[in-house]
Amino acid sequence: CAIDATSSNVVKCWGINDQLQVGNGGTDSYYNSPLSVDLGSRRTIVTVTCSSRHCCAILDDDSVKCLGRGIYGVLGDGDTSYHNSAPITVSGLGQPSVIPVTIACWAKHSCVLLSDDTIKCWGIDNWIQLGDDSSNVDKGTPVLVANFGANLCTAGLHIGSHDAGGICATLND
């Protein structure tokens, strides 16, 4: 998926669609031309990130929507069972006073950096990659990553490519 800046910042997706990750609601297994994704009435996209199985976007109203394969809770809709979905709003991010700044996706989990310098993650947690000090329990909604320490603002968020999909935050210290 990518942002089409020539068309009011809409997101367009293409490619393999076996888990609805193209986001147009279609059931064809592959789309070779970019298709617009409906993210809601009059919504524009701020940023988008994708894995091989799902995509997540921050919208102009500071909401986060994810689409694609929903196993392990990766879509942030509270459901950890296997399901595919068109764009769905991620719940539990602390809005409206705390807004998403950037987002990162891995095949089985996602994380968002929030304006209060905290990070929340959701999805698979088989190797405790969500960082919430829990023990291997998948999360269908965002959980707070354990404390980084006082006054350490995060400057970026990255998810590694190793099987565990380790999460790294770039700090401003």
Image (cartoon, grey):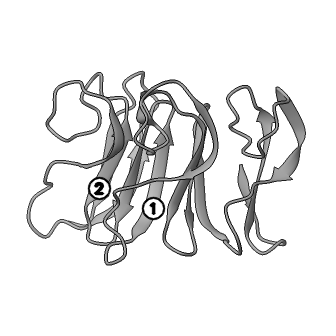
Horizontally, residue 24 falls left or right of residue 32, namely left
Crowdedness of circle 2 by 10 Å Cα count: few (<14), some, many (20+)? Answer: many
Type of amino acid at the residue the image marks with label 2: Ile
Query: Disc 1 or 2, which lies upstream in sequence?
Result: 1
**Percent coordinates x, y for residue 120 in the rendering:** 31, 52
What residue is at 25 percent from the left and 61 percent from the top?
A: 118
Crowdedness of circle 1 by 10 Å Cα count: few (<14), some, many (20+)? Answer: many
> Could you say whether the residue bearing mark 1 is in a helix, strand or loop?
strand
**Percent coordinates x, y for residue 111 in the rendering:** 39, 48
Horizontally, residue 4 falls left or right of residue 173, namely right
**Location of residue 17 by image quarter:** top right
Q: Which one is in front, 10 or 84?
A: 84
Above/below status of 130 relative to 28: below
Farthest-out residue, bottom: 97
Residue picked out by circle 1: 102
**Percent coordinates x, y for residue 59 in the rendering:** 57, 68
What residue is at 14 percent from the left and 37 percent from the top?
A: 133
Q: Quadrant of the C terminus?
A: bottom left
Horizontally, residue 136 falls left or right of residue 65, namely left
Type of amino acid at the residue the image marks with label 1: Thr
What residue is at 31 percent from the left and 56 percent from the top?
A: 170
Q: Which one is in front, 29 or 85?
A: 85
**Percent coordinates x, y for residue 20 in the rendering:** 70, 35
Q: Are the residues at dot 1 and dot 2 in contact (C-beta closer than 8 Å)?
A: no
> Could you say whether the residue bearing mark 2 is in a helix, strand or loop?
strand
**Location of residue 32 by image quarter:** top right
Residue picked out by circle 2: 119
> Disc 1 to disc 2, how far (Cα)?
10 Å
Q: Which one is in front, 111 or 163?
A: 111
Above/below status of 22 relative to 59: above
